[in-house]
C-alpha cells in the first residue's frame, strides 16, 4: 500500500515537473513531423533527431529509473529490437530528468543494447507532451509521428505497431 502511494506521488510529481504551471502540453498528432531535438547519449556523443535517423523506424521511449514499469518493459523490448534492427528499427531510450550516473547504473543492470539519451532538464519530454512514464512514440522512415503508447507496453503490442511501419 505504501509502495502504491509512493508510485502515485511520483507520477503526480513527474506530471507537475514536466508541465509546470504553464500551458497545456502539446497534443502531437499522428502524421505530423516528429519534433526535432539534440540530446547527449550515455556514450558521450550527441544525437540530432530525427535528422540523423531518417530512413529508419524509431521508437522513442521516455523513462526513469523510479518508474515501476520501465525496467521490465525495457528488458522485454531488447529481443524485439534485436529481431528488427536489421530492418531499420532504432530504439532511443530517453531518460527523463535524471543525471548521467543514475541512468548509467540502471542501464548497466538491464544490459540493453539500444541507445540511451539523456533529457536531464525534461525539455524534450515536455516538447513531446509526456505526462507519465513510460511513454513511447513511434516515428516512421520519413520522420513523421505514428503510434503512441501511454504507459506500460508489451513486446506483442510493440510488434503490432511495428508491423505497420516496417
Image (cartoon, rainbow, N blue to C red):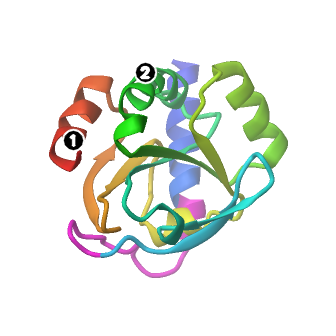
Q: Which residues are magenta?
A: 16-32
Q: Residues within 10 Å of mark 1 (few under 14, many from 20)?
A: some
- Residue 128 position within the rendered picture, expressed as x and y whole percent measured from the top left: 43, 66
* Secondary element at image label 1: helix
Judged by depth in the image, the label closer to the viewer, 2 or 1, is 2
Quarter location, residue 20: bottom right
Callout 2 touching callout 1 (CB < 8 Å):
no
Residue occupying the far front of the picture: 86
Q: Nearer the viewer, residue 31 or 127?
A: 31
* Secondary element at image label 2: helix
- 153 in relation to 98, above or below: above
Q: Is residue 22 magenta?
A: yes
In primary-sequence order, the first of circles 2 and 1 is: 2
- Residue 91 position within the rendered picture, expressed as x and y whole percent measured from the top left: 47, 43
- Residue 137 position within the rendered picture, expressed as x and y whole percent measured from the top left: 36, 53
Real-space CA distance between mark 2 and mark 1, rounded to the nearest whole angstrom: 15 Å
Q: Residue at x 54, y 33 (%)?
A: 7
Q: Nearer the viewer, residue 97 or 114?
A: 114
Tag on residue 79? 2
Tag on residue 142? none
Tag on residue 161? 1
Q: Is residue 128 left or right of residue 5?
A: left
Quadrant where the C terminus lies? top left
Quarter location, residue 28: bottom left
- 142 in relation to 117, above or below: below
Quarter location, residue 115: top right
Q: Residue at x 43, y 21 (%)?
A: 79
Q: Residue at x 41, y 65 (%)?
A: 54
Amino acid at each position: 500500500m505504501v509502495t502504491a502511494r509512493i508510485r502515485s506521488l511520483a507520477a503526480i510529481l513527474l506530471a507537475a515537473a514536466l508541465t509546470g504551471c504553464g500551458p497545456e502540453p502539446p497534443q502531437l498528432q499522428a502524421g505530423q513531423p516528429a519534433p526535432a531535438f539534440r540530446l547527449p547519449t550515455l556514450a558521450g556523443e550527441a544525437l540530432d533527431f530525427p535528422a540523423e535517423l531518417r530512413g529508419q523506424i524509431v521508437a522513442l521511449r521516455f523513462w526513469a529509473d523510479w518508474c515501476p514499469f520501465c525496467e521490465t518493459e525495457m528488458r522485454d523490448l531488447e529481443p524485439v529490437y534485436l529481431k528488427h534492427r536489421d530492418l531499420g528499427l532504432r530504439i532511443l531510450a530517453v531518460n527523463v530528468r535524471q543525471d548521467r550516473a543514475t541512468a548509467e547504473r540502471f542501464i548497466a543492470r538491464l544490459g540493453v543494447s539500444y541507445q540511451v539519451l539523456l533529457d536531464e532538464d525534461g525539455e524534450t519530454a515536455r516538447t513531446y507532451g509526456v505526462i507519465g512514464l513510460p511513454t513511447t512514440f513511434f516515428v516512421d522512415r520519413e520522420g513523421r509521428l505514428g503510434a503512441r503508447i501511454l504507459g506500460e507496453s508489451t513486446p506483442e503490442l510493440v510488434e503490432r505497431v511495428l508491423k505497420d511501419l516496417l
